Amino acid sequence: MTRFIVNDQPVEYRMDPATPLLWALRDASNLTGAKYGCGTGQCGACTVDVDGEAVRSCQVAIGAIEGSQVTTIEGLSRERAHPVQLAFIADNVSQCGFCIPGFVMAAAVLLRKDPSPSEAKIREGLTNLCRCGIHPRLVAAIGRAGRAMAGQEVLPIGARPGIDPADAARMVPALAPPAPVLPSSPVTGSRPVRGFHSADERVQPPISPTRPDRSHGGPADGAAPVGSGR
């Protein structure tokens, strides 16, 4: 049995001490923010904070961190209001989002050690990988988060956890669905908007050049008329 602190809560894992921290967090504690990416410690999707250091949790056995303090993305900020998280939202850093928890944790550790890192230090300090290519926005957002932590900039507050989707859409306009485009009125004589058809219009599928035109009578190949007994 291995004991350590996870997100300020003492935990005892009744697992093999050789179990990677990532699987203890995900399978036993249901803390799924840390992701399994490469499994070799290269991508950083599984990054968590262990005793103030950014650690690839897929490479650390729980037996090796007995008594340590572990913080995952779930425990970084209960309200998701950490400056790094807010900067990522404000600068639209995320793309697919899979690597983001690892980047957030690594960036939080970096800024705790150096609140005003240069661009070169950010690039050197964050060795996590993103296959979507968010790095230009990422570097800018981390610099912005550092300024916010230093009181030099105020970041907008994102949608709070558990918020109703409609309220979230009002707070973050990009989440609101686009307004439907209505067809032009037939009274004006203008043509309908592409993709919309009036109630009395029948849209015929395109006729394949390799098949006979059966749109004016006769069942299609393989189909039988109702009541034919076929």
Image (cartoon, helix red, strand yellow):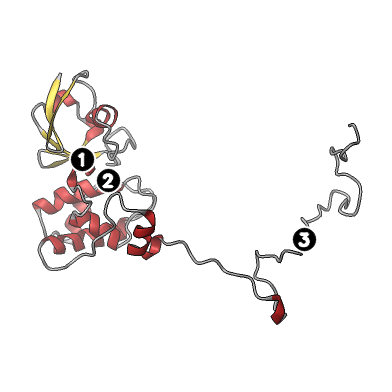
- Dot 3: element: loop
Image x and y of residue 28, in percent: 26, 26
**Picture quadrant where residue 15 is located:** top left
Q: Which residue is mark 3?
A: 202
Q: Can I make out residue 128 in this image?
A: no
Comparing labels 1 and 3, the label whose residue is closer to the camera:
3
Image x and y of residue 186, in percent: 71, 76
Dot 2 or dot 3, earlier in sequence? 2
Q: Which residue is mark 2?
A: 101
Q: Of 158 and 166, which appears nearest the observer?
A: 166
Instruction: Check if mark 1's residue and mark 3's residue have beta carbons within 8 Å.
Output: no
Instruction: Check if mark 1's residue and mark 2's residue have beta carbons within 8 Å.
Output: yes
- Residue 72 numbered mark, or none: 1
The quarter in which the N terminus is drawn is top left
Residue, far bottom: 188
The structure residue drawn at horizontal position 12% and vertical position 25%, both measured from the top left corner, is: 3
